[in-house]
Amino acid sequence: MNVAFTSDNIAGASDSVLAAIVKAAQGNAMPYGNDEGTVQVTNMLADLFECEVDVFLVSTGTAANVLSLSAMTPQWGNVFCHQESHLLNDESSAPEFFTGGARLVGLGGANAKIDPLQLRKAATQKIGDVHTCQPGALSLSQVTEVGSVYSLEEIKALTDIAKEVGIATHMDGARFANALVALKCSPAEMTWKAGIDIVSFGATKNGVMAAEAIVVFNRELVKNLDVLRKRGGHLHSKMRLLSSQMAAYLTDELWLKNAMHANEMMALMQDGLCGIPEIKINTPAQANMLFCTLPDGMEDYLKSKGFAFYGGRWESGVVRLVTSFRTLKEDVEAFVESARRFNTLAAKQSRI
Ligand SMILES: *Cc1c(COP(=O)(O)O)cnc(C)c1O
């Protein structure tokens, strides 16, 4: 197989997760989440976040995001997000469908982080005007879509504005663990202590087969998710198979170990690429994703050497590299070495 830095969801699942599914599949258990394993996952997440939480397991990140939003915003609300967000660009019209027609508003801001000034402006205009979409919810991605990470202060600045206008804040944590490891803070600090009301706690990209947890901190603002999940077709009857994945993910800090590995591999990659002057780092990687601009011909050269990654989707030369819990150090080193070799070859050719 190719050496691939295409995405973190090209990797399979951690062995202990798969073993846990096999074990959970033995014998009988009550359906629809009325089993011991599912209760256990809620308790584990309550411990992890150091507070009482409601937990709703679903099997895709899109479902976690759009169900969360559907519990937060009125149908006539604006959902503020970044213009680069997965929510806006990569979830088809699921947000509109699940919220019953709420409007996504894509805001700007450097490094795919929402600019607080733009949020304030958009969220405070024409309040109470029946002709205008009213503030409905705020959603931010941690890690962002370009591989940057909001600091705790940056999260707080945004959630403060949301609180001022009386809307709830959602965190799209498809790469929650990678962000947490980057910030070296506690899960509580990165979420409810910074004003987050609900999080899509991603696990699929970081070692499980298919399970994500919607974790609700603010039960006042975020309601009816039990019904909304059923209505949205994500109340799995064999919930124990999802719960078993999440329990294994949280056991012995597998989730942190996996993310630490992915982030370390990206740090190694970034260090190596930084040493090649012809390569431009577009957004410094803080977690496990890097956007950079390669010189003419390098992308094709690297692909011809068997490396897979996304390019050709953005401005000319811009590529995305993602490492995962399964990425091998040798593969990162081989990639960097090939990039270096391309440069040497190109330099020689230009001298001829
Ligand atoms: C991958 C991802 C998701 C979830 O996507 P699914 O394909 O629905 O599982 C959500 N948000 C972000 C930022 C992602 O990268």
Image (spheres, rainbow, N blue to C red):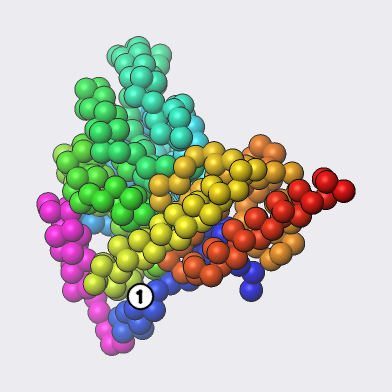
Q: Label 1 belongs to which residue? A: 17
Return the x and y of residue 185 as percentages of the image width and height: 22, 49
Residue 296 in the image: above or below residue 325: above
Return the x and y of residue 343 as percentages of the image width and height: 70, 51
- Element assignment for label 1: helix
Question: How many numbered callouts?
Answer: 1
Residue 120 in the image: above or below residue 301: above
Q: Name the residue rendered at 49%, 68% in the picture.
A: 329
Side of 344 relative to 78 (left or right): right
**Residue 214 on the magenta segment:** no
Return the x and y of residue 289 as percentages of the image width and height: 48, 51
Q: Name the residue rendered at 40%, 51% in the picture.
A: 287
Side of 188 relative to 145 (left or right): left
Return the x and y of residue 351 as percentages of the image width and height: 83, 46
Which residue is the extreme one toward the bottom? 27
Closer to the camera in the image, 324 or 244 = 324
**Residue 50 on the magenta segment:** yes
Which residue is the extreme one toward the front? 351
Q: Quadrant of the N terminus?
A: bottom right
Query: Badge 1: few (under 14), some or many (20 or more) residues near its Cα, within 10 Å?
Result: many
Can residue 24 be seen? yes
Closer to the camera in the image, 38 or 29 = 38
Region of the chain picked out in magenta, as a range: 25-53
Can residue 167 be seen? no
Which residue is the extreme one toward the right? 352
Q: Which of the 4 image quadrants contains residue 337?
A: bottom right
Side of 122 relative to 323 (left or right): left
